[in-house]
Image: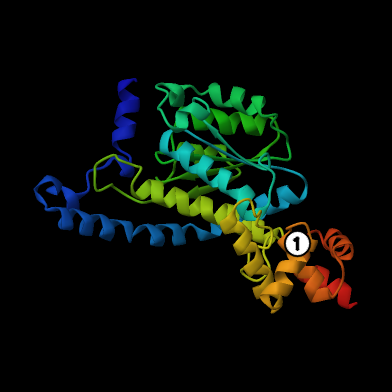
């Protein structure tokens, strides 16, 4: 790495030495944990300051998904793992296809459990990996980099824009280079870590909070919730079957046996079962109402009421 790049990296707030933790190795365990907890408490405020940009990004993702686009997270190391983690949680939570929300990570999926050295320094690699998943102009690529300067992410955002896709960046430093490569730039300035340079700590927490917001808000805007209930949950195990049954009962006020029966009649699709009970119709009619309402339960019930 050239000397000027090393100097630039050292100047980043995420790489700075935290004055509150300079004696970290002299503290007892409870003191270490209290200090970490105090520092973690600052993350939510840093995220709040970035809410306007996060909202623009979430609305843009929702709009892209309505047009058939995908949400694609892109990152290296901890940032890549955070994006991939958010992506794999979307199918069971929101009933999406595994192809609808993807995580692309420097070095491939094997890098999730074992670091692939040097992958994050290759600005051309991300473009090739985006091509491998068939990147389309309708997609939204969200590039994550705590430093805001990871070559892999910069190259990926440039490649995405060259292919006509929309881009969002998430960095934990101000005036980050990746911000200049994105249509919507999110900067959550978390400052120096308790353990100097360990951006899996506050910076990692901040990125996870932002990914939570992007996926959840965009899915809610896309009709994946009724009230605060995840009516598109995919009941793929015993816990989720019970959750789907409780969702139907809570959304409709129906007795649990009636909710369970409606869910079974709806092919275990909670959203359809909710419309069946609220609109007093069968599964076929409920499914038709949902199609007409673009999957929105509230609008489907309103359509049934005339």
Quarter assignment of residue 133 = top right
Image-based side of 260 in relation to 292, left or right: left
Q: Is residue 41 above or below residue 163?
A: below
Q: How many marks?
A: 1
Q: Where does the image place residue 63, in percent across and percent down from the top left? A: 72, 52
* Mark 1 Cα-neighbour bin, 10 Å: few <14, some 14–19, many ≥20: some
Residue receiving disc 1: 264
Would you place residue 99 above or below residue 49 in this image? Answer: above
Q: Is residue 188 visible?
A: no
Q: Quadrant of residue 262?
A: bottom right
Q: Residue at x 39, y 22 (%)?
A: 117
Q: Position of residue 202 (x, y in %)?
A: 35, 50
Question: Please, is residue 186 above or below residue 248 in the view?
Answer: above
Q: Position of residue 191 (x, y in %)?
A: 32, 49
Judged from this view, the residue extending furthest toward the left is 26
Horizontal side of residue 12 vs 59, given as left or right: left
How does the figure colour the protein chain or chains?
rainbow
Left or right: 255, with 170 as reference point? right
Horizontal side of residue 291 vs 78, given as left or right: right
**What element does badge 1 sit on?**
helix
State which quarter of the image contains the N terminus. top left
Which residue is located at x 51 percent, y 43 percent? Answer: 85
Residue 245 in which image quadrant: bottom right
Is residue 200 among what the camera can see? Answer: yes
- Identify the residue shown where x is 71% and y is 71%: 259
Q: Residue 179 in the image: x percent, y percent?
A: 51, 41
Picture residue at 67% right of the left edge, 64% below the top: 225
Q: Quadrant of the C terminus?
A: bottom right
């Amino acid at each position: 790495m050239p000397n000027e790049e090393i100097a630039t990296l050292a100047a980043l707030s995420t790489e700075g030495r935290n004055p509150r933790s300079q004696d970290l190795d002299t503290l007892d365990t409870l003191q270490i944990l209290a200090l970490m907890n105090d520092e973690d408490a600052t993350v939510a405020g840093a995220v709040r300051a970035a809410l306007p940009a996060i909202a623009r990004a979430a609305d843009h993702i929702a709009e892209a998904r309505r047009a058939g686009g995908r949400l694609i997270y892109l990152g290296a190391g901890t940032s890549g793992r955070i994006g991939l983690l958010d992506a794999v949680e979307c199918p069971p939570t929101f009933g999406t296809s595994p192809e609808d929300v993807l995580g692309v990570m420097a070095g491939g999926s094997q890098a999730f459990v074992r670091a692939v050295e040097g992958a994050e320094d290759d600005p051309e690699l991300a473009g090739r990996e985006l091509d491998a998943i068939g990147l389309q102009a309708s997609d939204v690529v969200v590039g994550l980099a705590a430093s805001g300067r990871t070559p892999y992410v910069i190259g990926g955002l440039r490649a995405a824009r060259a292919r006509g896709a929309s881009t969002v960046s998430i960095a934990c430093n101000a005036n980050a280079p990746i911000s200049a490569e994105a249509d919507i730039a999110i900067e959550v300035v978390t400052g120096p870590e308790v353990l100097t340079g360990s951006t899996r700590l506050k910076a990692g927490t901040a990125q996870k909070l932002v990914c939570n917001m992007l996926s959840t808000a965009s899915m809610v805007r896309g009709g994946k919730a009724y009230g605060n209930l995840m009516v598109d949950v995919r009941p793929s195990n015993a816990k989720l079957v019970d959750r789907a049954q409780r969702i139907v009962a809570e959304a409709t006020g129906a007795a649990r046996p009636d909710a369970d029966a409606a869910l079974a009649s709806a092919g275990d699709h909670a959203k359809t079962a909710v419309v069946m009970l609220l609109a007093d119709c069968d599964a076929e009619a409920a499914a038709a109402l949902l199609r007409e309402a673009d999957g929105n339960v509230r609008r489907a019930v309103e359509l049934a009421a005339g």
